[in-house]
Image (cartoon, rainbow, N blue to C red):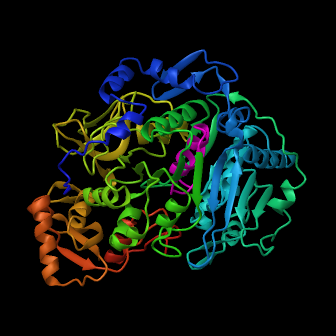
Amino acid sequence: MIYNQFMLINPDPVIVGESFVKDYDALYKESIANPEAFWEKLAKELSWDKPWDKVLDWQYPYARWFVGAKTNIVANAIDRHLSTPAADKVAMIWVAQPTDSAQKDEVVTYTYKQLNEQVSKFANGLKSLGVKKGDKVMIYMPRVPEQFIAMLASLKIGAVHSVVYSGFSATALKTRVTDASAKVLVCTNGYPYGKKTVDSKANVDEALKDNKTIEHVIVVDRLKNGSGKTTPRDMFWSELVEKQSPECPTEMVEATDPAFILYTSGTTGTPKGVVHAHGGYMVGIYATLKLVFNIKPDDVFWCTADAGWITGHSYILYSPLINGVTTFIYEGTPTYPDIEIWWKLIDNYKITKFYTAPTAVRSLMKFGEEPLKKYRLSSLKILGSVGEPINPEAWLWFYKYVGHEKCPIMDTWWQTETGMHMITPVPSVGLKPGSAFKPFFGIEADVVDEKGNKVPPNTQGYLIIKKPWPAMLLDVYNNSKRYHETYFEKIPDVYFSGDSAKIDEDGYFWIVGRNDDVIKVSGHRLGSAELESAFVSHPKVAEAAVIGKPDDVKGESIKAFIILKQGITGDDVLKDELKQLVRKEIGPIATPDAIDFVDKLPKTRSGKIMRRVLKAQELGQPVGDVSTLED
């Protein structure tokens, strides 16, 4: 069948039959009529040491969910499964990055029972170092099993973890450790990343110079060479855990107590420490994974993100375990040791639900369909997209060649601050390629102008949320003023997401991109994601990035950086084709003034294009901190 971005793709009847949600409109209407009852019903599916006195205490702009209840995320992610047959089910499969394509997979697996023992040992280790409820544990690690064990162990004893993405520089790590006043830091001595080895412990040592709060540094010997102990406060993970008991009680905490701090970069100033609580966050991520990915007991769920980001917290670790399924983790990148590694892993480990980023899809698209033809990919049932808007061409490629036209794509919009999916399909609805569908149940979202007035259909505006939701951030750590200013003062009485979007005549949401990723040409606001999508719709284009350059006449002019598909050579004729395509797709105002054909784009390891780096290089300005760049 030939597809295009304007058609509605209806789900396979088998998928509809298996779905928890058969009628989106009816359940959405019910959830909005009484959101507290909707969330309370889902919360009762989980384990609580003490029930709540009140579902929601909403003192604008602060929401507190399940007030008076006692629980712990770990009690629901691990403990509640131990008295069921799930105790002997595989909870986690970890595959190491191979050093070459011929190497056999190095695999670590844990059943729920085994994972509980490892988490308990490390939790006891933390307690032996004096870590107690409310203390901050900093985790600066790549995707290794110990990263996830450390996260669970911290919460198990009531401590608060803060995971720092392993690609961040020493300066970025220092900023976060200092702001959180962390007591313990967990890291690796280094780790393989593609063809190179990252010396992450050197970053730790640099970051902790003059630090007054870190008492212990726990080092995982990922390199298996005994290196990494450079100061008296350093100890190896193995030395700490080998003498610990495999039994440790889970500390029951208030549902509104903080579980973790996750720092997210703002457009200006220092990173914001987004604080999430145990109770509401736990209910939100449990419900969204269950209903959006139609989670069943035998699922093997693979989210390709990193735990340095909220996606890894919510949908690699906590919600798969809360739902009692197997979570799959691959240490390496989508193209190492070869461009087929993801497809091999899906077949080998029978992945059923696969959740990844549009940038990764586009980077694999440029190699064409041939690499996929060796693999059956028949275990897949549902695909997912996260991190940025997915352009229709990438959506259709993903649907056709990875999902074999039978797997619906759950294109999810959400943020570090929201904790959970906010605008997303469920498997039983009709999909439009490139649209994130409509709000999740209990979520009231809209698109408005700068005065808060609803904009007409197909008009770009500000994406806002009208009412609180369970996984909503508690606050910005140590900076309530920033919480108010960033999220609740730009447009009064609503949550301001900082993203731009459109709603079409059918009520489908189309995410355009960040408000600060907008290019203003002659007074017209053009989203970078919309422009890039137009370029990628050309059959010869694999990826595109667009920036605005100062222009004396138009305010800003548009420059595009284009990666072509393998075997294609760029020339002036193709540049003219692309300019005409953009004029046709968006309008004459969007015509780029310049196009460069490039071999690669500056990206973070999670796959996001760093447009600011392109812009700084183009304008001859300092590029700033590039420690998060893949290359």
Tell me if residue 329 can be seen. yes
Q: Number of labelled discs?
A: 0
The percent position of residue 115, horizontal first and vertical second, equals 73, 47
129 to the left or right of 470: right
**Position above or below: 299 against 330:** above
Would residue 478 be seen by someone viewing this image from the given angle?
no
Q: Which residues are magenta?
A: 303-325
Residue 163 is situated, as x and y percent measured from the top left of the image, at 62, 53
Q: Quadrant of the N terminus?
A: bottom left
* Figure quadrant of residue 393: bottom left
Determine the residue located farthest toward the right in the rendered image. 243
Q: Is residue 256 above or below residue 248?
A: above
State the image coordinates of residue 55 (x, y, percent, origin top left): 53, 19
Q: Is residue 317 magenta?
A: yes
Left or right of 4? Residue 482 is right
* Nearer to the camera, 593 or 566: 566
Is residue 387 found inside the magenta-colored segment of the image?
A: no
Q: Please name the residue shown 42% across and 21% down the image.
A: 35
- Residue plotted at (41% across, 72% down): 602
Q: Please give the name of the residue rendered at 84% of the width and 41% of the height, measured from the top-left corner.
A: 247
Q: Residue at x 45, y 25 (%)?
A: 60
Q: Quadrant of residue 484?
A: top left
Looking at the image, which is closer to me, 163 or 349? Answer: 349
Q: Position of residue 364 (x, y in %)?
A: 38, 68
